Amino acid sequence: MTIDGIGVLRAPAEQQYAAELAALAAADDRPRPPNWRLSPQAVVTYVLGGTLPDGTVLAPKYVGDRRLVEIAVATLVTDRALLLVGVPGTAKSWLSEHLAAAVSGDSTLMVQGTAGTSEESVRYGWNYARLIAEGPSEAALVPSPVLRAMRTGAVARVEELTRMPAEVQDSFITILSEKALPVPELGQQVQAVPGFTVIATANDRDRGVNQMSSALARRFNTVVLPPPATEDAEVAIVSARAAQLGRALELPAEPPALDEVRRVVRIFRELRNGSTVDGRTQLKRPSGSLSTAEAISVVTGGMALAAHFGDGRIGADELAAGLAGAVVRDRVSDDAAWREYLETVVRERAEWRDLYQACRDVPTGGA
Amino acid sequence: MSRVTLLGIRHHGPGSARMVVAALDALRPKVVLVEGPPEADPLVAHLAGLTPPVALLLHDEAAPETAAFWPFAAFSPEWQALRWAAAHGVPARFADLPASVTLAEPDGPRPRAAIDPLGLLAEAAGFDDPERWWEDVVEQHREADPLGLAGAVAEAMTALREEFADEIDDRTLRREAAMRQAVRQACRDTDGPVAVVCGAWHVPALAHLPPASADAALVRGLPRRRVSGTWVPWSHGRLARDSGAAGYGAGVAAPGWYAHLWDSAAARAAAARGNDTATRDGDNGDTAARDGDAATHDGDTAAHDGNAAARNDDAAAHSDDAATHDGNTAAPGNGTAAHGNGAPRNGSLAAGDDTVPRWFARACQLLRAEDLPVSTASAVDAVRLADALAALRGRPSPGLAEVTDAALAVLCGGDELPLRLVHERLVVGEQLGTVGPDVPQSPLAADLVATQRRLRLRADTGTRQLRLDLRRDNDRARGTLLRRLRVLDVPWGRPEDVARLGTFAEAWQVRWDPGFAVAVAAAARHGSTVASAAERVLGRRAAGAARVAEAADVLGEAVNCELPGAVAAARAALDRCAAAATDTVELLGALPALAGTVRYGSVRDTDPELLRTALHGLLARGAVGLPLACRGIDDAAAERLLAALDGAHEAAGLAADPAHQAVWRQALARVLDAPNAHGLPAGRATRLLWEALVLDADAVAARLRRAVTAGAGTGASAFVAGFLRGSAALLAEDPQLFGLVDGWLTGLSAREFADTLPLLRRAVAEFSTAERRMLGERVGAAGGPEGAGPAWDEGRAARLAAEVRRLLATAGSTGGGRG
């Protein structure tokens, strides 16, 4: 894999995977919808991974149900907008970025939803110096990423849609149903070019979200992304991503041993589900979401520790610090849950003795 | 050989059904053979009176509960073949091993071949799901030459059979021998073409006929039984559950979807035929059947939204809308983005095909009826997503997987819960078939149908709550019917907690299962009507009763079923058992049920005096034996006696006349005087008599003291336990009683107290939390045995008294209104 974006911390997907996309486009002989870089089938292949006739190996970007990816891509083929819903860390933004990269070759037309997101960042703003000097004109208009996507027939991404205030969310209604954005100041409206669509992501777990109005909700096709179904699937995701990130960050550490990854994943899954793998012990659930994404960061954090302060090989000591930090989000209640887990589960597993020792030595601030 | 055409099908596949009908139209055979038990041949004549789904029910005449079903839906190829034959005046026969053989197999009728031929073929074609592969290759084939298709299926199966020749079991070989014999017979009977409709797997085995003697040898010596049968209504839900059960085996996971496919295809065909003046008889038949189906379905829906007409209009509007919308997006130069154009458009919106739009229209109706907001626009978008998904997955048109995915993403907002509703009501469906009056039925089944109609009690396959007011004749008859059917092992209704509703109301949960047909058939040997059969069964049970409780149960059921003959038999049985019974606990144990029966007897058409006499007889016998039964028994036996005694006491108070209540009280009094009586019943008898005002507080105090002083520790605590259990309020209320118990406890030595504690604990543990708290407060407040209660607050008491009076007044007025 080549990284074109040398000198940036993290290049957008279409640059990171430029080679794969180019190979796919070359091999793709199926009809493409207007302004699509690839055919729908090729987009699915890009996301799920595979091998091309010319021998190019495509890395899987999303590990999970093929059906969900097909629904997502088919949604984009029709002119409907796509809403990816799931608890934090289920690869919603990740999938959204790769879909945009594969469909339009540009995953950067993105609006981040926050409580402070204003209508200008969804519609358009003004270059006020020009506005005052020349009056309203095409040149004084500052288009939002959504407006630019409409003009070029690309995919616009909206992250955390439900974090926007409800009235800002609703400005999408016209865009999605009319495929046009009126600019009353200029007495005209911008009409979307074929290929334009919106991929939005939303958490269904966090507090402080603004529920979507039903008028907006029905303009989206909803795909719920579940957490990885099995431990093996999750281990595969974590180890692959951690290795990738390690390369990107140029960590002089070995890729993590599968056993260590498995331990992290098991701890996360057990705490997330509130019971041990064998189903015998009931556990307190910490308040954090303990997502796959956090498991990945625990492992990469461990790799960084091992590279710079250890022997370059990730072990119990390197994991312990990250684990406690990921699990204990609330100092009082989560600490109790973590301590209980350590004493009742980790301690009982003979082969986990080193991890127990290491974790016990890490202060978590609660006790 | 060439005049025999083999049509290999997938059981219950609508595509296969289309292929079969088209092939038969082309072939014009003189005889149609259908895979199925030959005993059912005479039943083919009744086809006209049936509305699918229906099932053939064949059972062993000697043991009717040994039975098997062969279900048919409207979209089953077998059913369509039978219909075609009936419409064209061509004989249709079944070809397979006789049911008499399959029924006699030790482990009952079993499904078909052990290996999955379609799974292997699908795997070879690169499909992960054999159903989908078959659907794509055969079921979705609309215009292909039917005979060519049948030939292709035969070829594929031949190749498969060669590969897996070793894995075909003996049973399959015997079945195929029987089928070949049927084919030979058919060839002898006619000079014209013969069509055979059978599972695709059997096609290669029927392609070449070996010498008849070989086949005869294969099927010789198989066990034979006399078999009779009929048609019974079947349901889509049952069809979905039957995957791998008796008969054809292959159940289907999505009968509702298949029915929808079949109906849509039939509607298309009917529309295409619209101008064709030379409409054939058979087609009329088909269309009529379809219309019948649709009507039934509408009826079902009407129950949901109360307006079937609106539904139809709406559905039409939807499909129009969808068509219009599609037109818009497809139009070049239109302002709206037309992404859909990029994908190959071969989807559901091809001219005249409204299968998928109609499906989503129905789904929208369903979800809206459940108050879930889905708009017509959503249905349009769902159709488009299903099309896009089909194109993406390279399928000729949207299948069940695509419409389900689209429904989830568009109509259900990603939520699995409403999708489950769609699955249950649409994908599986609740459609129930009907069987016409001319179909031979057992007299019992006919009586059941007639009674159902008379009582307006429909045999729904959905679960329903039924509240019956027994003062109304129709409701009472319904309750009686449900009870009689339960006696016959047809658990159509399940009685719900009756106790709380009083004497005049009953609550039932009713759900008809088409599988009850077996029990109905089996019950037919007991009588020609539901009433007579139930009476016979109850009479037999009464005659076989050996214990008082059994006889009392039968009596109770007989009264509830309003069967005088059975009541008489059960009464006789009760007398017989009571006379023979030596166990007082058994006698007393039968009393509560009997008391309930006496109370119901006034509602049912049974003379309550008759039952009361029976109750009095049992009570008198039990009263005589009671003192003796209390003597020389261990603690476990005493516990049993205590339970029986409590129940009997309640029963006596509820249903006995004053004279017999007096007899019962005398028996209790004798328990007190009986020497060596166990403390538990003696203590309880003491309290019951006190509650009945036979003993005053002083007398009770004396008895307690006597028991305490006389007994050597354990006897005394048993007495106290029997006395205290369930009497917390009494204890807290009566200072004399409280003082007595208190004095007794404080007077115990340390060791005696330790011995007493477990029994006391057990007695007190049965008190409710509130009662225990009340007792604890009483003990805490009392201070001493005769201690005065807490200071009396005059003002508070007055307020409380006023409130209580107000409550009593309210309760009195409403009570009066009800009374």
Image (cartoon, grey):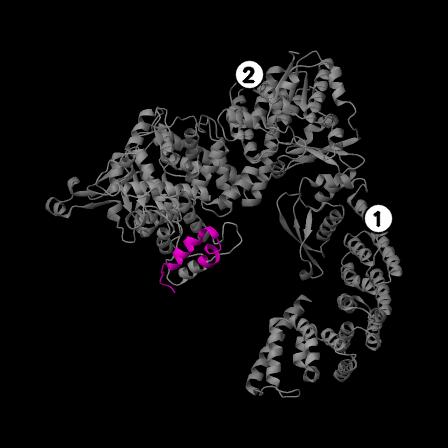
Secondary structure, mark 1, is: helix
Of the two numbered discs 1 and 2 on the same chain, state the one appearing first in sequence.
2
Asked whether the viewer can see residue B375, the reply is no
Which residue is the site of mark 2?
Answer: B148
The quadrant of the picture occupied by the C terminus of chain B is bottom right
Quarter of the figure with the N terminus of chain B:
top right
* B662 relative to B780 in the view: left or right: right
The spot of residue B496 in percent (x, y) is 67, 55
- Please identify the residue farthest to the left as the structure is shown: A133
Q: Tell which of B789 and B277 is nearer to you.
A: B789
Disc 2 marks a residue whose amino acid type is Gly
Question: Can residue A356 be found in the magenta stretch?
Answer: yes
Residue A73, picture quadrant: top left
The disc at residue B540 is 1
Q: Secondary structure at mark 2?
A: helix
A118 versus A20 height, above or below: below
